Amino acid sequence: MEKGDCIIDGGNEWYENTERREKAAAELGLLYLGMGVSGGEEGARNGPSLMPGGSFEAYKYIEDILLKVAAQVPDSGPV
């Protein structure tokens, strides 16, 4: 990996581990983003819950992708 590269960890991890890994990656000149995914069967059918955490700069790299994924979730109407 080279300085400025971004690591995206797609596991559901405890936020303190994400914060620790982000700091360690930053010391190497890397960006780190933890990306928890939740939803089970319902998420597979209607769109998962994506929970990014970590480096805001890393998030900005994939923000457009996440917004497109979020746009795919059908509107269930008024709550």
Image: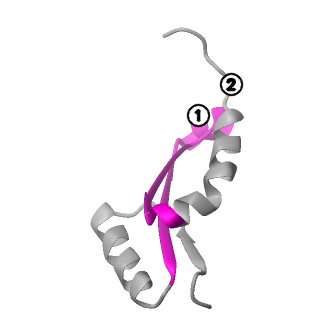
Quadrant position of the N terminus in the picture? bottom right
- Left/right of residue 68 with respect to residue 40 in the rendered view: right
- Position of residue 50 relative to residue 12, above or below, is above
Total numbered circles:
2
Where is residue 44 drawn, in percent x and y?
65, 41
Question: How packed is label 1: few (under 14 Cα within 10 Å), some, or many (20 or more)?
Answer: few
Where is residue 43 drawn, in percent x and y?
59, 38
- What amino acid does circle 2 point to? Pro
Residue drawn at the location 54% of the way across and 59% of the way down? 59
Residue 3 visible in rendering: yes
- Position of residue 51 relative to residue 21, above or below, is above
Residue indicated by mark 2: 74
- Left/right of residue 47 with respect to residue 13 in the rendered view: right
- What amino acid does circle 1 point to? Glu
* Along the line of sight, the residue nearer the viewer: 4 or 68: 4
Residue drawn at the location 66% of the way across and 31% of the way down? 73
Alpha carbons under labels 2 and 1: distance apart: 12 Å
- Left/right of residue 1 with respect to residue 35 in the rendered view: right
Magenta stretch encompasses residue 34: yes
* Along the line of sight, the residue nearer the viewer: 18 or 14: 18
Residue found at the far top of this picture: 78
Residue indicated by mark 1: 42
Q: Which mark is residue 54?
A: none
Q: Which secondary structure lies at badge 1? A: helix
Residue drawn at the location 62% of the way across and 91% of the way down? 2
Where is residue 42 drawn, in percent x and y?
58, 34
Task: Report the span colored magenta.
Answer: 30-57
Residue 11 visible in rendering: no
